[in-house]
Amino acid sequence: MHRSGKSTTSLLITLLLTSTGLLPVSAVFAQPFSHADSLRGSLRPERTSYDVTFYDLRVSVDPATKRIEGTNTIHYKVVHPFRRMQVDLFANMAIQSIRQNGKALAYSRDGNAIFITMNEPQPIGQRRALTIAYSGSPVLASNPPWDGGFVWRTDTTTAKKTNWLTVACEGTGASLWWPNKDHLSDEPDSMRISCRVPKGLTCVSNGKLIGQKPTPDGRQTEWTWFVHYPINNYNVTLNISDYAHITDTYTARDGQKLPLDYYVLPGNVQKARTHFKQVKTMLACYETYFGKYPFWRDGYKLVETPYWGMEHQSAIAYGNQFRNNTFGFDFIIIHESGHEYFGNSLRCADPAEMWIHEAFTTYAEALYVEYTQGKPRAVDYLNTQRKLIQNKFPLLGPSGVNYDQEDTDIYYKGTWMLHTLRNAVGNDTTWFAALKALAVEKQLSIVYTDEIIDFLSERTGVNLRPLFNQYLRYPNLPTLDYKIIAKSTDELTLSYRWVADADGFNLPITVRVGNGDGQTIRPTQTWATTTINSAGKLTIDLDKGLFNTRSVAIE
């Protein structure tokens, strides 16, 4: 979600090779990994043997006791024959039963992992289902959304002081409150979410509202939502309060109309009506760069929460108190909605590759500024983020463990990497066509780092792999070494080279002398020389790329 790195002071471990290969084994991460991290992050046979096709989650929430109880029926297809499967649910949540075909299944726990022994063979290709009944008090989020858990608050915008419950669980894991295969690589094709709440409260969840009805005793209301698309587990959410409901419509370029639904606290209705007008401009911007909104059947929702925000699919958590930044837009609306395209539609399969979610989405912020205010202003926006880059760890992390990014570079360095690649391509028409093709053609699918590199290289006609390798797989920035080896009244002779970790790094650079026009040079990792026909002070155009410069003494 947001720009908060985990701080650890434990022993260093060597970077593990990812499934996409080529990570330098010399890179180190400060984060230790436990047995529990391996159970959460690894793809063991107990997980890979089945593919989830549908979740049917039914939950009852009691704000008075801060407890939940419910069932999740997991529909799956057998990929490899098995007799033992892993499902995840935090150890503080009690399991009442696990049943298949009306019969109880034996299970054992290993911390937050549940290992279920099947009563009968699971032949390859078969479609089966099992139901887990559970209850408990989910962990409380101490600092949401960075620390996952339930958030119990009170609406103080009116005199009623109604209960206000929300959930955020990215990183910590959806299994903190409902049983599932808690790994990014497997998403259901669709999902139903039914939630019972005390009478008078509204429950807003993901997808499209398909019904609400009182329970037989009249004390609760059951709200049922249906998600028509794949959804990653941490995006599944509940938002419960006495929400006011505001409706609007966005019309796409092809004339199709998208319902916009805003759920806010009753005292904030007028502010929301005005403030949320920027949503339609944003959707038009993203349609330009990334294609139509990818979850059309489920609609687009903003739901007010007591924490800053989260990219919950088709139900964006909004808690920025209706404030715009100095660039005139609400960061939470623009950023979290950008995740609908990168993170929710096009998504990674392992936390190690979370740069895919955050780099492209942070870049979408700059593109929104460019769309509404022009390119120079977008560069100004990028420069506010540049100073936050730390260059301590590679953007790609170790795979197969429950990895939480060490710093915020997947956001700020990630967006600057993409800005750098745009200038390396050197043709905006080509670059933006490739970016849009990536979002549209890979819509609703899991993608991998190497797949993105190959796709953008092919569509732009530029070999972007050495540049991606430098910025993704190494913490250090490339450095441009240069020296003036001759200078006369009207010309300057310049020698230059790249010092970089990635083989073949060859980022083009714009230089200018005095007030003359910029000239593009194409340094490699070998010294080269060029003559610039101008006089004055040499300037390297830093706004077009992410790198260091260094003046080398004349030998």
Image: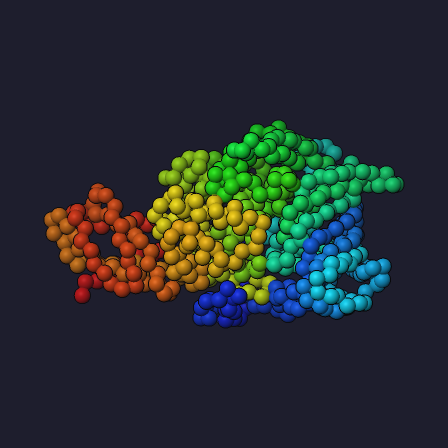
Classify residue 517 as left or right of residue 79: left
Task: Give the image quarter of residue 240.
Answer: top right
Classify residue 189 as left or right of residue 21: right
Return the residue found at the far right.
Answer: 217
Which residue lies at the image location 48% right of the left edge and 51% below the top edge? 359
Which residue lies at the image location 33% right of the left edge and 56% below the top edge? 507
Where is residue 26 shown, x and y percent of the image? 44, 70
Where is residue 297 shown, x and y percent of the image? 64, 40
509 or 537, which is in the foreground? 509
Which residue lies at the image location 35% right of the left edge and 45% below the top edge? 427
Where is residue 372 shown, x and y percent of the image? 44, 35
| Vertical order, 525 against 135 (above or below) | below
**Can you see residue 325?**
no
Which residue lies at the image location 51% right of the left edge and 41% below the top edge? 291
Where is residue 15 shown, x and y percent of the image? 50, 68
Locate the C terminus and report the quarter of the image it occupies.
bottom left
Task: Give the image quarter of residue 380.
Answer: top left
204 or 20, which is in the foreground? 20
